[in-house]
Amino acid sequence: MSAEIDEQYVTAILVTHDGVTWLSEVVAALSSQKFQPDQIIAVDNGSIDGSQKLLRNAGIPIIQQDREAGFGSAIAAAVKSLPKLEVTEPGVESNEWLWILHDDCAPDRQALKRLLTAALERPQVGIAGPKILGWYDRKHILEAGISITENGTRWTGLEEREHDQGQHDEITNVLAVSTAGMLIKRSLFEELGGFDPSLELFRDDIDLGWRAHIAGYSVICVGEAVLYHAEAAASERRSVDVKDAVLHRPLLLDRRNAAFVLLANSSRWILPWVAIQLLFTALGRSVIYLLAKLPGYAADEIAAIGLLIFKPADLIKSRRFRKEGKYLSARVIKPFIPSRSIRYRLTLERITSSVFNAFKSGKNQEEKIVNRSYSDIGVIDESFDELEYVPVKRFSKIRSLVKHPMLFGILITLAISFLYSRNRIGSLSGGALPVAPDSAMELLKRYVDSWHLVGLGSSVAVPTWLPLIAIASAITLGNPQTFLSLFFYLVPTIAFIVFYRSATRFALAKYSAFTAGLLYAFSPVILAAINQGRIGTLAIALILPSLFTLMPKDLRVEKLSLRRVAGICLIAAVATAFSPLFGIGWILLHILVFIQQYVSDSINWRTIKWQEILQNLGKDQFKKRAALIFAPIAMNIPWAFSFVLHPLRGLLEPGLSVGSSGALSILMFNPGGATAPGLIFIAPFTFFLLISLITKDHRDSALFGIVTIAVAATLSTYYVSGNGSAAQRIWTGPLIIFAQTLALLSAFSLFEKLIPILRSTNIGYRHFLSAITAVVTAISFVVLPFWAATVGADSLVRSNQDQVIPAFITDLA
């Protein structure tokens, strides 16, 4: 075999384009090959960074091309410069090979020898390629042969960030190999007509491999031949200057060429199906990019299909050319196209791995970057200058966003809210929300007036939340209408932020907090409150997570500073102003805690005398508890006095009376009512509370949440007359929010501890309960935001409606 290898004539073709950062190592790798190529030809596509100087110093001849020339044309220019291929005896294959290299790929010193050896042992092989590892992380496998899916995705069949442990060292038949390190028979290259000129960059490798199979040749990946690739163009480390790269956008060119390869090579009878898949895949990807606030990438997906539709001439020409050189049916490549089941399984494994990694708290693992050196590929020749090596970290906008869950969540909620609020831009009214005045001063004036024009007149105190709205509207230059429109738009985003911050302070991992925050922001109760104009419930949704953060988990106040107690009192007073029902619950909660702690701290509370009770009341903990109980009431005087004369007013929310659903809906954490999410959209909070009961650490919180939701369901069976013509069910949205906050914090804290246990134990009831909860959570995680962005936008609250109800102040007083 050694003598047979020595008879082979190999021409290495090195294509360069502003690759001086990597070129010195590439040339060093070529000079250190155990089997030296017979000649090296460099084709430079208009480099302006010193690449040409480096090549000349290395003694490599250069063919110069325009800066906009494509990769295929560079290879064609190099082949054209070679002497004409000699025709030997009929039936005897030529011994000439082309070894194609990029300026950002460095082959291992054994690479060429192993490629040639494997190809010569298999006479039917026309193309051989190496196993490609990362340039910066040289244990990371980038490719071991490539294929293409039915929707145009480049397919490697590798796991995410798969590391090289020798698992791909065998020789395998593949659809294609990358042009980085591709070894191809010169006779086959000329028979196929080289690379398709319509594919100037990206996917030309898959197209060539596809056509080689149709011509009756095989393509192999030699796992023991190794090459390190920086993927500079694909990862946007350098600009893409080829002629067809519209706006120099690599993603646009990649997507366009992927569609081109499928449409140019597929059988005629499946072309319509391929075209439909490409169209819907492009639309789906564009929506995902829009949700990630990457409109440029979304436009690339659509524009890629548009380029083929409006320029069909190249596609028609390519199909005609392939028809002339076709020897076998296109079905020969079917074994290399990954089936849907394989793709779905690998995708599911990646998602599962991501979910498991997401719940690992407190361990932010930094990427390990292998030390870069030339020890594995040889020493740089002294005939050229050694350039300074500047490591460039792999960059991906989506990956960067995923590493910052809070920012990613903000972008997601803003994008969904943009669609969700399309009917709520302007002066809002409808549902429980009447039309607001256009001046904050009018709100303040009505608050300080002693007499209000309600019917024949009334001296009833105006609610405290009214001046709060007036003060907050300073953000919009004193215009309450604009403020309310902005408020309703930003509610999901602010809810996500406050819950995310609260969850991280409860020691949840950032990805757990991200998931819980999105579930909270798009929970049925918040969506229903937005659609029905229940500003009180929305205020509670934004305030409550902060109270959870400020209060100790055991609700003891001994160690709280006076400043923190004052802050809690102020926040609780604001929450009470927007929801008297919350104020009632807050007071009852602290009275119960007060009694429970007093009883538990006493040896025999039945024998305690009044003198001892009075002495205990002088302690700091009782003073702080009393402040938490009475401060919210005191801060809402004189409005709070109205509840003494009319206790049922404490069960009313700000605004007009709007109907809601009954107890069953409340138990599902969905208050229901007009334009609220239907019961078919099951929220996972009930499952969270039930699962939290199985652990001692979270049992108390779960029981508290269950009692709260049970009280809410009971109250919803009663009717009360409010600011409307008919009595309606008591709205218990604030209680639902309280219960779902407990459920989320308890459940995700439990999941972080439970997942490692599930991995190490046999399948049991815990696994089944966790699986059911995970499925319900995933459905809710996707379906509720989708509902909000689509049919959920058609709500009771709309902009610029005619005012057919009393004035804002009089109805809400």
Image: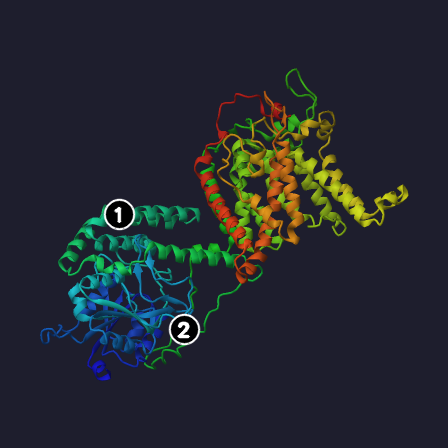
What secondary structure is found at the residue carrying circle 2?
A: loop
Q: Position of residue 371 (x, y in %)?
A: 45, 74
Cα distance in 3D space between marks 2 and 1: 51 Å
Q: Is residue 263 above or below residue 627?
A: below
Q: Going from the N terminus, do you reach mark 2 or mark 1 first? A: 1
Horizontal and vertical percent position of residue 320: 15, 54
Which image quarter holds the C terminus?
A: top right
**49 left or right, relative to 630:** left
In depth, the one of 556 and 720 nearer the eye is: 720
Q: Quadrant of the N terminus?
A: bottom left
Hey, which quadrant is residue 123 in on the image?
bottom left
Q: Nearer the viewer, residue 787 or 430?
A: 787
Q: Which residue is mark 1?
A: 273
Instruction: Determine the image quadrant of residue 463.
Output: top right
Residue ID for mark 2: 388
Q: Does dot 1 land on a helix, a strand or a loop?
A: helix
Tell me which amino acid carries mark 2.
Answer: Glu
Note whether residue 323 is visible: yes
